Image (tube, rainbow, N blue to C red):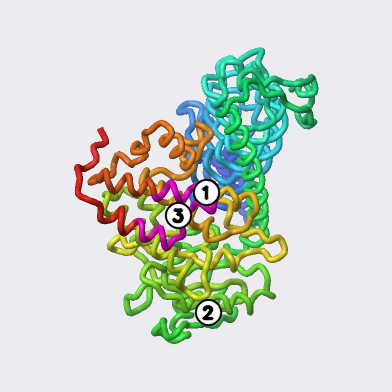
Amino acid sequence: MASLSMGSFSIKWQRLLLLLTVLMLVKLETTALNSEGNALLSFKTSIVGSDGVFLNWQQEDSDPCGWKGVKCDSHAKSVIYLSLANHKLVGSIPPDIGQLNHLQLLALQANSLYGTIPRELGNCTELQYLYLQGNYLSGFIPPEFGNLVGLETLDLSSNTLSGFIPPSLDKLTKLMSFNVSMNFLTGAIPSDGALSNFNGTSFIGNRGLCGKQIEVECKDDNQSPSRDPQQPSSGNLVYRKPGKNSTRLVISAVATVGALLLVALMCFWGCFLYKKFGKSDVRCLGMDVSGGASIVMFHGDLPYSSKDILKKLETLDDENIIGSGGFGTVYKLAMDDGNVFALKRIMKTNEGLDRFFDRELEILGSIKHRYLVNLRGYCNSPSSKLLIYDYLPGGSLDEVLHERSELLDWEARLNIILGAAKGLAYLHHDCSPRIIHRDIKSSNILLDGNFEARVSDFGLAKLLEDEESHITTIVAGTFGYLAPEYMQSGRATEKTDVYSFGVLVLEVLSGKRPTDASFIEKGLNIVGWLNFLVAENRRREIIDPNCEGVQIDSLDALLSVAIQCVSSAPEDRPTMHRVVQMLESNVITPCPSDFYDSD
């Protein structure tokens, strides 16, 4: 009887465990991420770099409706908006994006996406707005886009797309906005339907296109887009009424196409190197330095023992990250005595370059100037170099202009411009050896607590240059600052830095990024916008309406300096020494006059 009772008890426990197992499986089934969430996770996986926008995209969620950049229908819980514009995305768009069957808006503009546009996007037949401009997308425009019959806006401008414009796009009768400018498209523009409603601004910068929309006659039938878009024609174009403006447009388009091709190539190499080496950066710093590391201090600039610094480095993790960019991740390093430093982590890609790297860092550590960020020393670990800089509490100029709520008045903007100019002039003319920065942009201008400017990351572009390909990994992401001749030849000079500085001045004046969406819509960048305003005698309209205390004399003088700096001819650009002289004599201390009235 006892054994029977025990057996019965055992059976009951088995049944109870079985029931609990079933309940757990049911719970897992009900909380599993839905198919649209999995499609978005596939998109996340394909992105190898971002500004952290995916931090709350979690596999454990039942749906993606709470994820950043995602909006769902309130009833069906299906994804209707995916908006990730200007989040520094580096990677490709996976075919799984086509599983978002109820998507109405896809906004991925102003990133560094590369690769082809997936044909599967044609499955998203409820799409109304598609923004892919300002990336490095290549290949052909998918003919499947003709299935997007509800599409009202299609913007593919400022990429590296090639081939014909598919005739299927003529069926998009609801199109109100269409832009494929600044690509490598060829052949006849379809003109039997919806695309006949758009003028030349929708197609500018594609030297191989022809059609009535741009007043360029197609010479022969070989340019008909009815053929496979993957077989572009080599036929010639006959230009009708080639006036001065048309000639300038053709020359500009030719230069732009060549420049964009080089930028796309450099972006490809940059993304390749990032994919190949960057993923090892996910290890915490503690693991990195605990495997054996040494500290190099320049001229006693770090009043700590190597042991003290390494001990602090071992405690750093993702919570200490304060920035990231083409050169590496930046951490905040706080010492016990209250002193704070910035730690830039650069992953090693070639062990054979260690001696060269160390020698160059010694040189950079010897360069001291009021308007340069001070390199104090570095930590040499098995897998990375950890560069130790002064920490500047004001953050980057990019953050202040575009991401934070601070409003810079006219005096503050002039002070920042002058400081950046003096720092760059010192690198070009006064330090030994002289240094070409190669990557002047607002995110490389750091600010102290008083908004004094410091030029950062000087010398690093040369250090990270791939000796075999002669391509730097940092070019992608700085498009808009680069001089035309640099994009065409890949050769950096003092004058290419001067051009980038001129773009920086325009960015500070306008409060707009060099590739702001308002420019891209017109097939322009900030320099193109300036040239347009100058031609219209409206140059003062470039000023940020939120900037207070603007003086007309200073504004006109500063615009004159900027115009010289961004001249298309390098020989017409001033040296940085001359720029500083003009800023100090003509801009900073002009004759008093009425304040500028933006109204």
Question: Label 2 vs label 1: CA separation?
Answer: 32 Å
- Camera-side mark, 2 or 1: 2
Give the secondary structure at mark 1: loop
Residue 596 sits above or below residue 421 on the image: above
Rendered image quadrant of residue 249: top right
Q: As shown in the figure, which amino acid type bears the numbered disc 3?
A: Phe
Q: Nearer the viewer, residue 498 or 24?
A: 498
Disc 1 residue type (three-letter): Lys
| Residue at 72% in and 64% down | 468
Element marked by disc 2 = helix
Range of magenta residues: 561-582
Mark 2 neighbour density, 10 Å: few (under 14) some (14–19) many (20 or more): some
Would you say the magenta stretch is mainly helix, strand or loop? helix
Q: Position of residue 86 (x, y in %)?
A: 49, 43
Residue drawn at point x = 62 percent, y = 59 percent = 472
Question: 166 above or below 393?
Answer: above
Q: Earlier in the sequence, mark 3 or mark 2?
A: 2
